[in-house]
Image: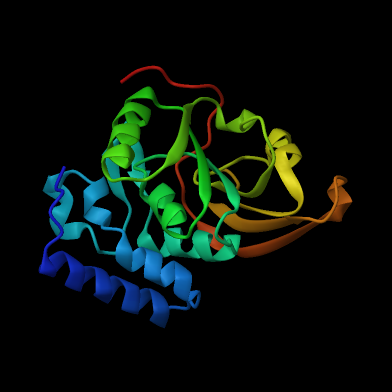
Amino acid sequence: MNRVDTYKHKGLRQQMVDKLRANGISDEAVLHAMNEVPRHFFLDSALDSMAYEDRALKIGCEQTISHPSTVAMQSQLLSVKPGMKVLEIGTGSGYQTAILCRLGCKVFTIERQKGLFDNTSKLLKELGYRVQGFLGDGYQGLSGSYDRIIVTCGAPEIPEALMRQLKVGGIMVIPLGDGEQEMLRITKNGDDRDQWQIEKFGTYSFVPMLNGKQMRN
């Protein structure tokens, strides 16, 4: 892992943020967080030169770190406020987790791949992020009640367990569909499905959301 944040990295990160702003990301708190979190820390050093390009990159276990534009969009759609409890499904590299921490959230995050879980948990701790991380099945969520839920993998359907764990008045951001997914923002105005407000925000491509936890490294 490359843990040195040089002037070059900072300059490339500022250019990334400027492009995000030009392309419609308007939440200044999100843009500030994106500028504060070194994306290259969450990648193998061999990928250092590509860290601030708007592209997904491999992180092992057949998983990827999302495009910066996708991380920014999902973060903006969440509309978080400092102190909110946020459940993240799919810790992955930990980059989105770190952005949520920078936004002042109390982050609870689930990863099903043991190899990623072990490596990312260690990295987040070393970087000083206070996160409640769990190895488990994202479909089942995590016992508790959350202000926001973010899903960072493509779900074939809206998981009922997650909607039960979302507070009334809360927001879930989830890419829905097989193959390509449509980014949804679901506002839970009541417990009944007909009380959910569902908004659509374009097509994305995520790795699939799978049942169960994967214990291989």
Q: Quadrant of residue 212?
A: top right
* Residue 169, position as x, y percentages in the image: 77, 56
Q: Nearer the viewer, residue 156 or 107?
A: 107
Tell me: residue 105, above or below residue 207: below
Residue displayed at 38% across by 23% down: 114
Residue displayed at 13% across by 46% down: 45
* Residue 16, position as x, y percentages in the image: 29, 71
* Residue 201, position as x, y percentages in the image: 60, 65
Q: Nearer the viewer, residue 159 or 166?
A: 166
| Res. 174 in view | no
Q: Is residue 41 toward the left or the right of residue 189 in the image?
A: left
Q: Quadrant of residue 52?
A: bottom left
Residue displayed at 33% across by 27% down: 118
* Residue 134, position as x, y percentages in the image: 48, 28
Q: Quadrant of residue 182?
A: bottom right
| Res. 102 in view | yes
Assign the C terminus to one quadrant of the image. Answer: top left
How many marks the image carries: the answer is 0
Q: Is residue 183 toward the left or the right of residue 109 in the image?
A: right
Q: Is residue 138 toward the left or the right of residue 49 in the image?
A: right
How is the rendered protein coloured?
rainbow
Assign the N terminus to one quadrant of the image. Answer: top left
Q: Is residue 64 toward the left or the right of residue 179 in the image?
A: left
Residue placed farthest to the top in the image? 215
Residue placed farthest to the bottom in the image? 22
